[in-house]
Image: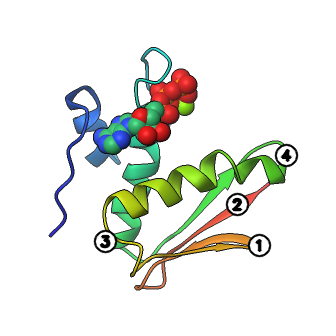
């Protein structure tokens, strides 16, 4: 059982997997990226999946997407279960799910 306070504005988005493309609208720092990452973590905890995260330049993942995933995993107290490996960047879940990062 995981309890996490979320932005009510993005609550439906977190559990909506019916749409292929989704656009989050909000000002800067309004937690758009946070909820995208949280949504992927919740899905991968539930089902054995591999998520691919793409940025133009591979190494820019480190201080953005990869560190955001790390922050959320620590914030939710899951750091003992979900491993964040930094070289190559990969996030591994106890059920075999993983998040991979490519340029
Ligand atoms: N539910 C939450 N619980 C804890 N921290 C949160 C939560 N939502 C947002 N934050 C914090 O707020 C920060 C800013 O959110 P985020 O980077 O997702 O905003 P953004 O809308 O993507 O901003 P930008 O437009 O600059 O890309 C996050 O890195 C995180 O530290
Ligand atoms: Mg963002």
Q: Which of marks 3 and 1 is nearer the N terminus?
A: 3
The image position of residue 83, as x and y in percent, is 52, 78
Q: Is mark 3 on a helix, strand or loop?
A: helix
Q: Of marks 4 and 2, which one's residue comes earlier in the chain? A: 4
Q: Would you place residue 81 above or below residue 37 in this image?
A: below
Per the image, the residue denoted by label 3 is 46
How far apart marks 3 and 1 lie (CA) works out to 24 Å
Indicate the quadrant where residue 102 lies: bottom right
C-alpha separation, residue under disc 4 versus residue under disc 1: 14 Å
Residue 91 as seen in the image, left or right of residue 4: right
Q: Dot 2: within a 10 Å radius of its alpha carbon, few (fewer than 14), some, or many (20 or more) residues? A: some
Mark in front: 1 vs 2: 1
Residue drawn at x 47%, y 54% is: 71
Quadrant in which the N terminus is drawn: bottom left
Q: Name the residue under label 4.
A: 57
Q: Residue at x 48, y 72 (%)?
A: 49
Mark 1 vs 2: CB contact within 8 A: yes
Which mark is in front, 2 or 3?
2
- Camera-side mark, 3 or 1: 1
Residue located at (47% from left, 24% from top): 29
* Crowding near the residue tagged with mark 3, few <14, some 14–19, many ≥20 C-alpha atoms within 10 Å: few
């Amino acid at each position: 059982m995981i309890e996490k306070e979320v932005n009510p504005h993005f609550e439906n988005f977190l559990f909506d997997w019916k749409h292929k493309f989704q656009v989050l609208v909000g000002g800067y720092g309004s937690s758009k990226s946070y909820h995208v990452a949280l949504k992927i973590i919740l899905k991968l905890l539930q089902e054995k999946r591999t998520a691919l995260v793409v940025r133009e330049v591979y190494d820019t993942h480190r201080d953005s997407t990869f560190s955001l995933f790390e922050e959320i995993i620590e914030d939710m107290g899951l750091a003992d279960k979900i491993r964040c490996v930094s070289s190559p960047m990969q996030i591994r879940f106890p059920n075999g799910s993983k998040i991979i990062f490519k340029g």
